[in-house]
Amino acid sequence: NTTGVWDDGGSNYFKGVWHLKDGTSLTANDSTGNGNNGTLSTVPPTATSGEVDGGASFGGSSYVSLANTINVTSGITYSFWVNFTSLVGQQAPISNKATLLDVSSGTTIEWYPDVNKAKVSASYSFSPSTWYQIVVTDDAAGNYVIYVNGAIKGSGSSWVMNNSIFASTILGA
């Protein structure tokens, strides 16, 4: 549901859902009703076509900044659609002061729950101009799974996530 509020019956499982809809102006409003709206960078991403009701095109220094109000006390799942125009170097769809998810040279996806500690990685051959759904799950005990298009591509154990890592999360860095 890209137009309604994502309601989980009061369980507060959804901390934030950002559709980044297609249109003439882009917004990063939270669809959960929690009010965790994103802020567009000074050089904002542009609205474009996407896999689910539109998307955002990030280039150069454009990004969406999410406030540090997302309080996670148990496991977490990141799920998003990406379409890389280039696969040279590192692409980082999600990052913040401690956490990083990146795709390196179009062949490796890496999840760093803490950039100063062990990573979980998976091999996958991405192609430019193709849509991919990437999902990373954390079971709150330090066990991580990386999915690409619904298939497990990597898993492992690292460290137990610390709630403090959610300060100033960046989408599309």
Image: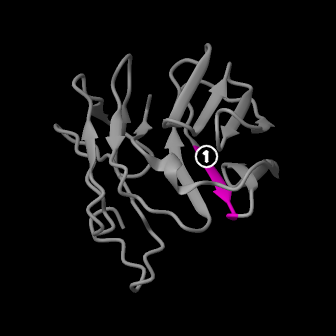
Q: Is residue 21 magenta?
A: no
Bounds of the magenta span? Answer: 133-140
Residue 22 x %, y % = 28, 43
Residue at (48, 73) in percent of width and height: 13
Give the farthest residue toward the left: 24
Residue at (74, 57) in percent of width and height: 142
Is 51 left or right of 49, judged from the image as shown? right
The residue at which mark 1 appears reads as 134
Give the farthest residue toward the bottom: 9
User: For residue 30, what is the image quadrant?
Assistant: bottom left
Is 33 left or right of 122, judged from the image as shown? left
In the image, residue 95 sits, relative to residue 153, either above or below, namely above
Is 138 left or right of 53, judged from the image as shown? right
User: Viewer-proximal residue, 91 or 74?
Assistant: 74
Residue at (50, 21) in percent of width and height: 85
User: Viewer-proximal residue, 156 or 73?
Assistant: 73
User: For residue 65, what is the image quadrant?
Assistant: top left
**Viewport quadrant of the N terminus:** bottom left
In the image, residue 155 sits, relative to residue 128, either above or below, namely below
Say which element carries label 1. strand
Residue 10 x %, y % = 39, 84
Classified by dominant secondary structure, the portion drawn in magenta counts as: strand
**Viewport quadrant of the C terminus:** top left
In the image, residue 66 sits, relative to residue 12, either above or below, namely above
Amino acid carrying label 1: it is Ile
